[in-house]
Image: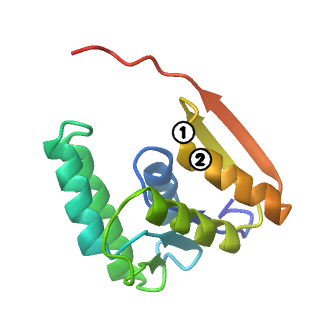
Amino acid sequence: MINRGDGIVTGGALNVDYIAIDQGLTLNPKADKIKVFLPVSLELYAQHYRRRAREGVITLEQAERLIDQLSKLRAINKLALRENINNKVVNQATYFERNTEVIKAADELLAFQVNHSAGVEDTIKKAKSKGIPIKLFSYTIKEVKK
């Protein structure tokens, strides 16, 4: 996308968002074609991801890599990281609010939906409402019992 002159808009999460930002920074070191919308400030987002690591939902390494990436992005181009400083908690409502901002800034949606994710479903619904093209990749991952 960046090679053809377009930009990347993400929600700053793990996996696909992380990879998109990583590749975007490789191709666009000034980060002027990258926009990442967070549901809260980076500081509160970092606290949220570290808490999720303590809960065992993700690893601490995943949390720290994402936090480092977003911090680096903000240092390179503070306009690339769009923090919602009005929100004080990370929850479904603030994530869905973040999805609205992502779709407002997007002209196309590449959605990677795992296990019928409600957040991705919300984003798809908003993209349909805006009338932008959607490419949906759906996956099912069976949970492994510990």
In the figure, is residue 78 to the left or right of 52?
right
Examine the rendered structure and indicate whether residue 97 appears above or below residue 141: below
Which quarter of the rendering shows the C terminus?
Answer: top left
Circle 1: element type: loop
Q: Position of residue 62 (x, y in %)?
A: 26, 46
Q: Nearer the viewer, residue 98 or 72?
A: 98
Residue lying farthest front? 93
Q: Nearer the viewer, residue 13 or 126?
A: 126
Colour treatment of the image: rainbow
Examine the rendered structure and indicate whether residue 91 appears above or below residue 31: above
Q: Residue at x 36, y 78 (%)?
A: 74
Residue lying farthest left? 54
Residue lying farthest right? 131
Q: Position of residue 101 (x, y in %)?
A: 60, 72
Q: Residue at x 67, y 74 (%)?
A: 105
Circle 2: element type: helix
| Label 1–label 2 contact, CB within 8 A | yes
Question: On the image, numbered disc 1 is attached to which residue?
Answer: 117
